[in-house]
Image (cartoon, rainbow, N blue to C red):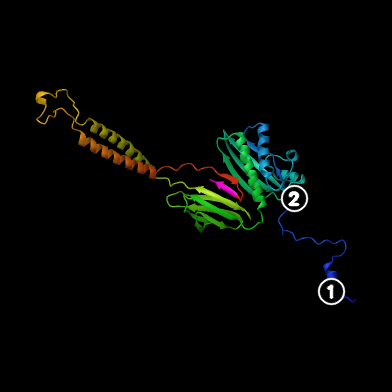
Amino acid sequence: MRIPLCVLLGWLLAVPPAGVVWAAPAGGEAARDDEVRIAVAPLKVDGQVDEATRKGWVAGLRRGLGRGSFALVEQDVVDQVGEPGCAQACLDKVREAGATHVVRTGIAMKSRDYLLKLELVDARSGAVVFASEDTCEICGVGEVADLLDSQGAMLQTRLAALGKGPPVLVLDTRPSGALVYVDGEVVGTTPIERSLLAGGRKIRVTLAGYVAEERELTFVPGAREKVVIDLQRTPGNPRWRALGGAALGGGLALLGAGIGLVAIDDREFKKRCTGAEVDADGDCRWLFNTGWGGAALAVSGAVLVTLGIVALVRNRAPTPKRQAQVLPTGLGLVARF
């Protein structure tokens, strides 16, 4: 049977010559799970901790990282070549040990308060892929290990989400109804769920009567960022707070005096209520007649107390902000501020 010339030419073009392998185009597909290996660099601790505590914290972080599908480099191997902070020379050594990404962790201690800063770094380029910051107030070393566990799981979740659709911001405020700006552009009111472009974004929320809040967040493809912001009331005028305090104090004094005068009304202030000292109605001449005056003072005091409380409430000083806490969830992340 004769083969048509066009079919023969097509077959020759489709089959590569012996020894030639066509390469897949670079940058098309995200790295497979078996291509990603994460190393935990030695912790950078600002403070004095014993070796057992340090190992416990590393174990907590590795426990969280181990919940994902990416492999971890053996810690003994990393400890031999790595160093706290793990700069570029350290990254090169860790990469030679088989790591594609490195987790750098800094822990600042002040009494029993801890500030945790974590970075997931590309071991080849040295670029920071993700960064997070969290605090643990009045905590024990075990609670710090649990927090590192949560942070490790969060890093795994965000790394796994790379390249899987656009990032999504899920934002709410307490109270709700705040106006939301993304990079200076109004996008809606809380609660809101919106897709954004990947990269660093400045989130700002405003609500009448409350202090405007800003957050700078980094969004990665596929990541679902859930953020809840507790708004603080606008701080009032210190002068009005002082006046409110004075009104409250003066009102309480007047109220107490008025109640006292009402209480002694019609009581004897001289023990001479006999004979000529008693009138035709049987009333003693030597009785207190303070009822009306006491009532007036009590009413005035109550009014001042009310005004003082209103002035203090409307002009109270702002309460301290709550610390950030980022926790992994089934769908993404929960960030509390």
- The disc at residue 196 is none
Q: Position of residue 234 (x, y in %)?
A: 43, 47
- The disc at residue 7 is 1
Taking 167 as reference, is 146 above or below it? Answer: above
- Say whether residue 229 is left or right of residue 262: right
Please name whichever residue, 286 or 282, is drawn nearer the observer in this view of the structure.
282
Please name whichever residue, 59 or 105, is drawn nearer the observer in this view of the structure.
59
Which amino acid type is shown beneath numbered disc 2? Asp
- The magenta segment is 333-337
Q: Residue at x 73, y 53 (%)?
A: 32
Taking 230 as reference, is 179 above or below it? Answer: below
Which label's residue is closer to the chain start, 1 or 2?
1
In the orientation shown, which residue stands out farthest toward the right?
1
- Say whether residue 322 is left or right of residue 240: right
How dense is the environment of label 2, judged by Cα within 10 Å: few (below 14), some, or many (20 and up)? few
Q: CA distance from mark 1 to mark 2?
A: 41 Å
- In magenta segment, residue 48: no
Please name whichever residue, 153 or 133, is drawn nearer the observer in this view of the structure.
153
Circle 1 sits in a helix, a strand or a loop, which is it?
helix
Q: Quadrant of residue 134?
A: top right
Q: Residue at x 52, y 50 (%)?
A: 214
Which amino acid type is shown beneath numbered disc 1? Val
Q: Is residue 43 visible?
A: no
Q: Is residue 200 visible?
A: yes
Q: Quadrant of residue 289?
A: top left
- In magenta segment, residue 335: yes
Q: Position of residue 235 (x, y in %)?
A: 42, 45
Where is mark 2, residue-wise? Answer: 34
